[in-house]
Image (cartoon, rainbow, N blue to C red):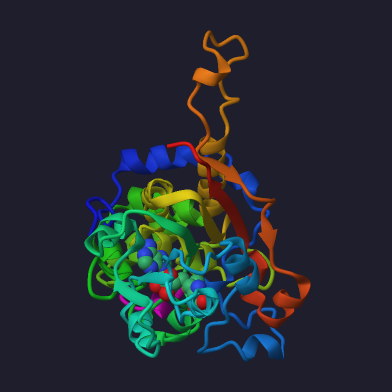
Amino acid sequence: MTKGVNSAPTKASLSSKKASLKGADKLEKYPLEVSVLNPNQNSNADETSSIGAHITVLLDEAVYALAIKPNGIYVDGTFGRGGHSRKILAQLGDGGRLIAFDRDLSAIESGRAINDSRFSLVHSHFAAMQAKLAELGIDKVDGILLDLGISSPQIDEANRGFSFRYDAPLDMRMDQSSGKTAAEFIANTTEQQLAEVIKNYGEERFAKSIARAIIAERNDGRAITTTGQLAQVVASAVTRFEPGQNPATRTFQALRIFVNQELEELSLTLPQCLALLAPQGRLAVISFHSLEDRIVKQFIRDQENRDDLPANFPVRAADLPQPKLKSVGKAIRSSAKEVKANPRSRSAVLRVAERTLVA
Ligand SMILES: C[S@@+](CC[C@H](N)C(=O)[O-])C[C@H]1O[C@@H](n2cnc3c(N)ncnc32)[C@H](O)[C@@H]1O
């Protein structure tokens, strides 16, 4: 594991994250990731049919965005059930190569069904991408896809502890072979740290009351070890919530993001993608909530814009660092047809950038 990825953030790091996410509360144009919710919430028959399976989001759009070269080397950082990977493989020629990553052992297990010499599947978090590719002798690739968040099988398998739909052990780790569970975090955290996690990662206005209720429960000798217990305690502390939404939605999202260090993973990986991409290589990232989309958007912006310098900056334009990325098109969202067929796709945002020729 890359150092720091699975460590608990200190108060200072949480505060700086809060600062870097300043204004995130205004960014709620994307609904919360529905994957932590009951996928049948606000449901229709189509939503029920997605239980247990993972329907790949923005499949055509994301693979098209990679502008696949038949003999290129591609990375799928989030294999899941391999929807994107299979489509990439279908577009690669005999000399092409695809390396996929997932930190979830069930995803890796499901990938064994792909018997293709052009394909390698690595059990790792994607923040170790550069090092893992180096082990395979790869230092440049032609495209990288990240389809962030969790998959439907992860939500739907009760014992993963992601969902308040089932009463199950409060785990929430994507990689059940390492790291601390949500229950372990709750057992050892302080009220203040818990409130910060719930506020920063769940954008929950009742974060303080929820943290107080959880810690009171714990200190009364009732350790919170199941999703059902947690959902109940949260519900007792939340007095208002969005119609049709479970009061524990934001708290579950926050704990999941924290337990898996999802924002840190993304922040550590984007610079690696930049270093790995060959000239004209493509980066495609699908986000499911505003916290992660903001990081992606800002990263691309930082790499392509030099206009943050003052107009009278005493350096010739040609001497300024040249952009290493350029955006390709605007953010892409799922079509109405896709959202109807797969409601989870309604919060998806795909951003695409291309590596320039600048070394
Ligand atoms: C939304 S699903 C991807 C679905 C996939 N594109 C498909 O078509 O089946 C996200 C997957 O990424 C994995 N994942 C999320 N964050 C990860 C990380 N930091 N490192 C490695 N895998 C990660 C999850 O375990 C999950 O299987």
Residue sitting at x 33%, y 71%? 103
Please tell me whether residue 30 is drawn above or below residue 76 in the rendered image: above
Please tell me whether residue 309 is drawn above or below residue 80 in the rendered image: above
In reply to whether residue 303 is colored magenta, the answer given is no
Q: Position of residue 203 (x, y in %)?
A: 53, 53
**Quadrant of the snapshot with the N terminus:** bottom left
Residue sitting at x 57%, y 77%? 56
Determine which quarter of the picture holds residue 64.
Answer: bottom right
Q: Is residue 39 left or right of residue 163?
A: right
Q: Position of residue 119 (x, y in %)?
A: 38, 77
**Could you say which is closer to the camera, residue 2 or residue 305?**
305
Is there any visible trace of residue 162 in the rendered image?
yes
Residue sitting at x 34%, y 50%? 193
Count of numbered labels shown in the rendering: 0
Quarter of the image where ligand 1 sits: bottom left
Q: Which residues are magenta?
A: 224-233
**Could you say which is closer to the camera, residue 71 or residue 331?**
71
Q: Is residue 349 left or right of residue 88?
A: right
Point out the residue furthest to the right here: 336
Q: Position of residue 254 (x, y in %)?
A: 45, 60
**Quadrant of the snapshot with the C terminus:** top left
Q: Position of residue 39 (x, y in %)?
A: 59, 80
**Could you say which is closer to the camera, residue 306 or residue 235?**
306
Q: Is residue 350 left or right of residue 270?
A: right
Is there any visible trace of residue 214 in the rendered image?
no
Q: Main secondary structure of the magenta part?
A: helix
Residue sitting at x 58%, y 32%? 305
